[in-house]
Amino acid sequence: MKKVVMMVAASILLAFMIGCSTTAPNYVNSAPLSEVDFSKHMEKGTSCETIFLIFGPFGKSSVVDAAKNAEISKVELVEYEQKNMLLIRQNCITAYGR
């Protein structure tokens, strides 16, 4: 009985350490891509935050920071990316514009 209880406790602890739960950013604001002029060169700025286990976030993941990193004054496109590794989750936002 002790072995079963220890195995269940270890499984629960491992599930918390891996980080099974995720959150998604708000994607409500969107614009049609037909209004974006892809023929012109756009600058690209990225902003990422990293979460290790339950600690963090370290860094900032926002459109404003991504635009500041590339000195973009008019943001035309925003790309969200989330990477889930064993104990680390990274959320990145990439802003394109002029």
Image (cartoon, rainbow, N blue to C red):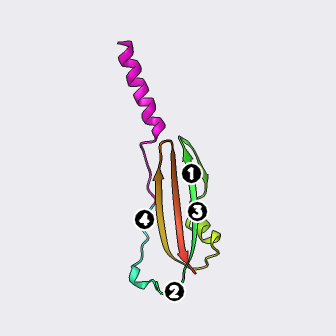
Mark toward the start of the polypeptide (2 vs 4): 4
Residue beneath disc 3: 47
Amino acid bearing label 2: Lys
Q: CA distance from mark 3 to mark 2?
A: 23 Å
Q: Are marks 3 and 2 in contact (CB under 8 Å)?
A: no
Q: Residues within 10 Å of mark 4 (few under 14, many from 20)?
A: few
Where is residue 34, by image quadrant? bottom left
Q: CA distance from mark 2 to mark 4?
A: 25 Å
Residue beneath disc 2: 40
Of circles 4 and 3, the one toward us is 3
Q: Is residue 88 left or right of residue 3?
A: right
Amino acid bearing label 3: Ser
Amino acid bearing label 4: Tyr
Residue at 48%, 36% in the rendered image: 17
Q: CA distance from mark 3 to mark 1?
A: 10 Å
State the image coordinates of residue 32 (x, y, percent, origin top left).
Answer: 39, 79
State the image coordinates of residue 36 (x, y, percent, origin top left).
Answer: 45, 83
Residue at 38%, 15% in the rendered image: 3
Q: Residues within 10 Å of mark 2 (few under 14, many from 20)?
A: few
With respect to residue 16, does 62 lie above or below? below
Q: CA distance from mark 4 to mark 1?
A: 20 Å
On-image quarter of the N terminus: top left
Residue beneath disc 4: 27
Residue at 64%, 69% in the rendered image: 69
Residue beneath disc 1: 50
Q: Are marks 2 and 1 in contact (CB under 8 Å)?
A: no
The one nearer the camera, 79 or 85, is: 85
Tell me how many marks there are. 4
Magenta residues (range): 1-25
